[in-house]
Amino acid sequence: MRTITIDQGMRFIGEEVEIKGWLYNKRSSGKILFLEFRDGTGVIQGVLTQADDPDLFETADRLPRETSLIVSGTLRAEPRAPGGCELGITGIGVIQKPTEPFPIELKEHTPNFLLDHRHLWIRTGRQVPILRVRDAVFRAVRDFFHKHGFVATEAPILTGTSVEGTTTLFPVDYFGEQAYLSQSGQLYLEATAMALGKVYWIGPAFRAEKSKTRKHLTEFWMAEAEMAFYEHADNLRLQEELVNYVVNAVVAERARELKQLKRDVDKLLEEVELPFPRISYAEAIRILQEAGEEIEYGDDFGAPHETALGEHFGKPVFIERFPAKMKPFYMKRPADDPSVVLAADLIGPEGYGELIGGSQRVDTLEELERQLAEYNLPKEPYEWYLDLRRYGAVPHAGFGLGMARTIAWICGVPHIRETIPFPRQINRLYP
RNA sequence: UCCGCGGUAGCUCAAUUGGCAGAGCGCUCGGCUGUUAACCGAAUGGUUGGAGGUUCGAGUCCUCCCCGCGGAGCCA
């Protein structure tokens, strides 16, 4: 007998097959039983009547939800079944019968309860398709970079210094020395790019900020890229191509999951049509003011502002030329206006906020020393970083893409905590 | 850190002016041969987040504390 996964069901209509998985839900109507099985690839309905096999019927009728099992039966097309096909059950081999009722009901729960049971919640409902989309997004990002001649690399997670000074870091005791969990691999990727040309990595970043919004986690994954001989305009072009590629690849590969999530895929594809608009920070302020927002040049965007900008364009939009004092020390400033930086944030549509932050980096020793001083940062911890400007410095640029926000946007889920298997938030370190 | 909302059965929520602690779901039992979060019936289930206080009487009012959710700030 052939062992198949549930997503292959339609391909084996008429055949007797075996499925390894779990009992997801059960309904009965007298002498007929409807058992829903899941296996990570999907859910399929199985049917069994008492007349088919009285002993098997009795056994099946007593199985609690989430029993692990191997079920065999004949696949048939059945319009009344969810998914269009169902399994006429001929045998059930129980692997383990739960000792207690499964806590996650197929009814409503509060977010708190679900997050406390995240290790079980991920088996149910929308969580499986979301995590499968997450996998597809990760792979699409890697494919894109691979196709564009990038080398995959890594940055350290344990670091001795802050990358961006301002942000709160998680302290770690490192053999008696003060260390921190990395908030970004960027500075290290700049070094690696000088060795390998174009580099990327998808890695974790940690921020000890007490953020309590749908867009923040304390531990999150970023796709970071750094390119030697790239200037600001090259940087933006690469970013929009990446976002366009990822969305198209995921829509193609995970159409079934996005449908389950009721995502408007056409809208998504329309949003990522190239090119993305590019506006200056000053223009963004003007657009917001015309929309009635109270904001002035020099103010940072709040969440409502980002949402308003996303809505104004209906697609991702680059905000360029931020005032330098709003941004970190390592960003290069254009010759025509040293009060701004050659950086851009990519603001996503539909209220998902900043998807990408990127910039061209300072590439001369003089500028870097001056800007470190401007930000009151000590030189010593950055000596290695200064070295990059001492030995064959070249123009270079890079960016960081927030994976969870990108996944939330593609899935159309409101909160990024559902886009990672085990979210880490303020007050949430378990499970 | 600030603002707002909340904490009652395993879960999701009711409880009038301060007056006997309730329902639905889940688990268990019974019924039902095409269910779609099935349905119908029965049974089970309580230190009302914690500590004080007011009162004849507190889930309800007061004080403090704890926890959660949403948002702000900060950021990707």
Image (cartoon, coloured by chain):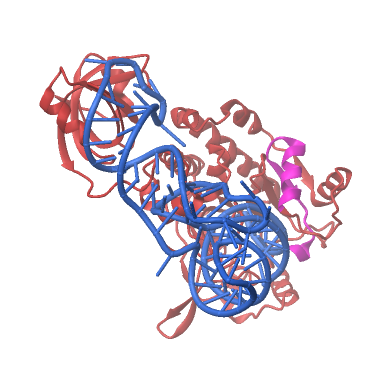
Rendered residue at 67%/43% (across/down): A351
Q: Nearer the viewer, residue B68 or A307?
A: B68
Q: Quadrant of the N terminus of chain A?
A: top left
Q: Position of residue A162 (x, y in %)?
A: 58, 72
The correct choice, above or below, for A424 with respect to A56 in the image is: below
Q: Position of residue A7 (x, y in %)?
A: 33, 27
Q: How many numbered marks have been drawn onto this rendered protein structure?
A: 0
Residue projecting furthest to the left: A55
Asked if residue A186 can be seen in this view, the reply is yes
Rendered residue at 20%/36% (across/down): A62
Chain drawn in blue: B
Asked if residue A220 can be seen in this view, the reply is no
Rendered residue at 83%/62% (across/down): A339
In the image, which residues are magenta? Answer: A303-327
Q: Position of residue A85 (x, y in %)?
A: 32, 18
Does the magenta portion include A83?
no
Asked if residue A293 lies left or right of residue A59, the reply is: right
Chain drawn in red: A
Picture quadrant of residue A23: top left
Does the magenta portion include A304?
yes
Q: Nearer the viewer, residue A213 or A185?
A: A213
Q: Nearer the viewer, residue B18 or A258?
A: B18
Q: Quadrant of the C terminus of chain A?
A: bottom left
Asked if residue B21 lies left or right of residue A321, the reply is: left
